[in-house]
């Protein structure tokens, strides 16, 4: 079950401390020119070690594409994505062999499988998301040809949040800010929070907001594969994600219908559109042509940079010192992953939608 | 794409105003005794026309099981679920042939397919969820044998919310309240809100909370089919659902790691458990053995019981009078659907988990 | 696992002696006009009781389409196919409750599920194939719009075979012959065989040949979903099918490469084609544009119209008298099923192929 | 669509002349000890360059397992299989850039995708089957724990065939013979044929027979995923495969029911079994507990070791000299691939069958 998608299928494998992590991206359309520089630049947006929020582990995350591309163009055959694990120091983790850290996957993996690779989280590590970012970058190259853009940014860290309408967001400069919050004042306050939390040896959660713009109306499959159901599944599969909402989401649940409905109107080209977009670009599970807007909640990182209590597999309480290479806040790095998963979901929906009509 | 699930697969078909709606539930385990009375009783929990919140349309929703059961026991063959549409007055809807109502699926279906059954929402109607409730009732019969219980209740309507810990919820009496809120004072305030909104010809949204108790640790498939990713997909496929969260969800996103971690402890049987359950019963996508707790946000019903503006397929603004048989608030009826989707997701996860080991 | 296909998905349910058999055909393209008369006429090509080969059970097989069609046109929503079981006399089968008939599914179903519907074969009955024929008729209506025709005919019964090149087959008159062999002399010899076998209380096997003409080049998905791999899976899922071959199949396995290669040439429109079609219209798993030709072997019906030995579930040998309503030879009726499965496979491949390119 | 299997899923990627070929085997059960020597030994059974039948290209096919295994034991996480392409001389193939060779995939791939990797067959190359053999070897390690053995051998090359009952086959020594025919006299005659065909610059086809022994009764999923339907799909996905049959297959199609039925009897342990096994170990799509026996037909290799006619993409006839590194007969190497696909199919069926019952 390590595969995501229906026609565009991403299958990933690999643990954080094995020789490499590997993905096969199947169903990618033929004839797309691959921009290798853009791919590597996208990888760098997920890199740890940028700013204060993230872990000092510095992997280059050099992506190799081993198949499916010929003379720089996709052939329609599956694309193999390989990223070597160059900075894996397994020795750090030997002490965790018999230890279950709280709010990690140690206990659940061991219970499920009867065995686990305890080095650095093994298969449960967020290292896996590097492959998603690479695959998402490829998906975006296809979406570019259709004028579809996917955006994501940090809209909350701890108590600091950014509440701007989509139109007011400066999407060009998201990656100029270590926090990935594209609003200088808010970003500064987020940086402060992160510094404070870091000094306390603690961690903090946050929210990533996303938008998919330039979508045609008609994407998404009723009933069980509604556009936002596929998106929710994509987002909730990201490590540490605990919530998903589309449009006005939970806030809209407290509102009246008369406030929430999106009235129709004609646009400059006399095409039907909506005046507002409370629905987040989807009605009945199918895109309206307005931007799809959504938010993903991330819990704080479970590994604290201080001593904390854990339990051994024989039930003894022990103390673990988490000081090391962990992120204080996963949200800035998650921005790239949210963006990638949205791009993959969108391209898959586009390919699926092609079978709606015979000709 | 009208199928939900991996090994337990629910495929549904039918429109709100056709002769019947039909589902095939495939992969249901053999040897489960079917309690037909319990099935029909569960159907009644979803019935409209109960209390003030829901539509006066009163379908009996008599369920027929046409296959897969022999001498009252499941045979492992697919179960056909058929529910006749007895109260469909198509004449009501002829006026909508060329009209797109705001925040309905009229426009998006027409754009996607080039044709739509405009009678009563057609395929986009929440009528489809009756089949989910029937299938969920069957799934619950299997879960009963494992001691697994699924609960759902209304935790918010408009501005009124119920914030009780899981332990304090009286799950026995949820269906005694038209609002499906199992707390008399809060339920009374919800009833008031619904009356007020009804009188205003308006509608209102809300939140359904759910819990799955008695789960073993180890359910869920990393990476893309995490237990809560499957649950999110299930919930976001319900009509009008706009948000999903597990455990502390969006609120937890604003917290510190030191507050959120769930410390391990030993239970009365010396088995490893957690003292708190902020994670909502899942770590690394796999169940911990604690209850899975989640919330689903529903937007207000789009059809107002008053005149509202719509647009024709040729771009003319028109006025529609929605006074009729629509719900003021979908949440009380959605409780049964949330419960059903949780039961289906859980049983599917249990069946999938059986392939983890060879013997 | 009662679903066939990738994007065009046929899910069937129902036993031979339940109230009805039901299918949901999902992924059928929107906008196809449904010819109800053609549908019913196709059903009649599978009817038993025609000619001497088949069982005297005479079901009308009246097909009801309960969803997915509006004003006679497909809407893109799933199509429910329902066929009532009108001629089911369960009393005939009570005697088989504890008996395993040789070369039937009695023993294997009981072993797998621990329970079985022993009336008339239950889920294992060829009654299920009526739904395939109905779904295939719908698929053919879509294929008609693309100029694609699917043919099938009886090419062997017992020792009598028809060995004509595709061009020499009179496809117009296949259904004029009870044996479904479109060559008068051969058909007469097949009828003789069937009479002789019937009089002996025995049964006999045979071969159905099929052809899919008018296909574009490029259908089929390497590597695991080659066009002929999907076709093989489709055909081998038919009751009593024991072999499949494409092009020259097993005979070609004994030949030299210099005999078997299909030389290229230009057709009348200066398009590349092949002079011969030994490959059966597929190279590397992808259609060449030439007709796909294939053959399916069917074993003799296991129920003999005489006394035969069986065993009880407690291991006692018993004698059963099979005189009743069984076919002497399944092949004439299987022709319609082979044709239907080929139509479904082809339409699915066409829909899948649409995702090869982005635009 | 480069994935095979339902719960045990093999996804492969890579072209014959890229840097490596890669597979991800997902769903492999946890806790299986991996025998790396047995894996490499199995790879060697597929190696070209053994005996006279196969191509002189000598790849070591050194398999690397990059994930999913910890301390020599499977963890339940996906297993990455990587095999470097060490002997790829792309320069040989530049001449084929604009040329379609008869009965190759050149034309169909180019037509489907609008682009192709023309070096050595690209994605259509049988090089991909090395990954299947590796994955099949892993599957066999799991099957070994259940006492299930998969066998395959060459039963026909050109006009020479081996017709022995299963019991008379010496499965221990199959790989002692370059032809993979475990009968010394027949093997010698096959070697002669291959020499003669080689000297003529021609190629020849053949048949691989397979058997799966030690299976429990009850495997396989009715209706569309019958055990032999899954097996047929697996086998027909192998390069050059043109036919599949189970049990008596095409020959049985010409027989009487009274000859073909498999009478029941009790075995030494008083368990129900069958006296004969004409059905090939399957009834109603479900295994009987007797060995599953099947045959796969392979066409002759299309590349002749002499001059042959081809066509350019602009329609010009050209002459190509195929003298090079191609197999005279693919059958001896296909034996390992047939065996691997049978092992994968069987393990998948076993995992699927675990969901038949709840407990």
Image (tube, coloured by chain):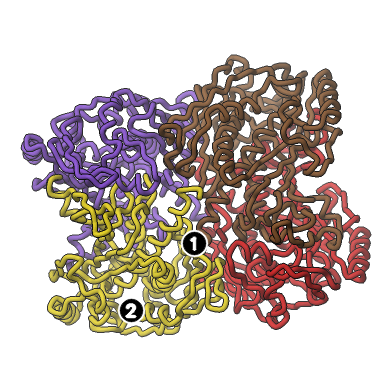
Chain colours: A red, B brown, C purple, D yellow
| Residue B136 seen from this side | yes
Residue B58 percent location from the top left of the image? 63, 18
Contact between marks 1 and 2 (CB within 8 A): the answer is: no
- Residue under the point 46% across and 80% down: D36
Of C304 and A286, which appears nearest the observer?
C304
Per the rendering, the mark at residue A347 is none
Chain of the residue where label 2 is placed in the rendered structure: D
- From what the image shows, is residue A188 above or below residue B18? below
Q: Residues within 10 Å of mark 1 (few under 14, many from 20)?
A: many
Label ID, residue D45? 2
Would residue B257 appear left or right of B101 to someone viewing this image? right
Is residue D330 left or right of A97 when viewed as pictured?
A: left
Residues indicated by labels 1 and 2 sit on the same polypeptide chain: no
Q: Which residue is mark 1?
A: A76
Res C258 seen here: no
**Disc 1 or disc 2, which is closer to the eye?**
2
Helix, strand or loop for disc 1: loop
Q: Chain of mark 1?
A: A
In the rendering, at what x and y percent does residue A122 appear? 65, 71
Residue A204: horizontal and vertical position, in percent? 85, 62
Q: Residue at x 63, y 68 (%)?
A: A123
Asked if A85 appears above or below B79 in the picture, the reply is below
Q: Is residue D139 left or right of residue D329?
A: right
Q: How many marks?
A: 2
Q: Residues within 10 Å of mark 2 (few under 14, many from 20)?
A: many
- Badge 2 marks a residue whose secondary structure is helix
Where on the picture, by quarter, is residue A54? bottom right
Identify which residue is drawn at 24% across, 63% down.
D297
Nearest to the observer: residue A332 or residue C277: A332
B136 vs D9, left or right, is: right
C-alpha gap between disc 1 and disc 2: 31 Å
Residue C21 is situated, as x and y percent measured from the top left of the image, at 38, 31
């Amino acid at each position: 079950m390590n595969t995501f998608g229906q026609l565009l299928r991403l299958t990933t494998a690999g643990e954080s401390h094995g020789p490499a992590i590997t993905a096969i991206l199947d169903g990618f359309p033929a004839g797309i020119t691959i921009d290798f520089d853009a791919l590597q630049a996208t990888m760098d947006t997920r890199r740890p070690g940028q700013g204060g929020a993230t872990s000092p582990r510095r992997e280059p995350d050099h992506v190799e594409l081993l198949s499916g591309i010929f003379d720089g163009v996709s052939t329609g055959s599956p694309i193999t994505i390989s990223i070597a694990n160059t900075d894996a120091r397994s020795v750090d983790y030997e002490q965790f062999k018999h230890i279950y850290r709280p709010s990690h996957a140690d206990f659940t993996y061991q219970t499920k499988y009867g065995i686990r690779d305890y080095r650095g989280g093994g298969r449960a590590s967020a290292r896996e998301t590097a492959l998603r970012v690479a695959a998402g970058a490829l998906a975006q190259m296809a979406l570019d040809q259709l004028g579809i853009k996917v955006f994501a940014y940090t809209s909350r860290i701890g108590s600091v949040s950014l509440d701007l309408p989509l139109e007011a967001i400066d999407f060009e400069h998201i990656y100029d800010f270590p926090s990935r919050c594209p609003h200088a004042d808010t970003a500064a306050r987020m940086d402060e929070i992160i510094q404070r939390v870091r000094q306390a040896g603690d961690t903090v959660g946050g929210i990533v907001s996303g938008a998919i713009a330039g979508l045609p109306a008609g994407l998404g499959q009723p009933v069980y594969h509604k556009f936002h159901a596929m998106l929710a599944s994509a987002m909730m599969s990201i490590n540490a994600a605990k919530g998903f909402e589309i449009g006005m989401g939970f806030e809209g649940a407290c509102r009246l219908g008369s406030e929430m409905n999106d009235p129709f109107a004609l646009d400059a080209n006399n095409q039907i559109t909506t005046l507002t977009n409370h629905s987040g670009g989807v009605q009945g599970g199918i895109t309206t042509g307005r931007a799809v807007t959504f938010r993903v909640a991330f819990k704080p990182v479970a590994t604290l940079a201080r001593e904390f209590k854990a339990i051994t597999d024989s039930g003894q309480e022990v103390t673990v010192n988490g000081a090391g290479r962990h992120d204080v806040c996963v949200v800035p790095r998650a921005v790239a992953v949210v963006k990638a998963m949205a791009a993959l979901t969108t391209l898959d929906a586009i390919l699926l939608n092609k079978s709606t009509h015979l000709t």
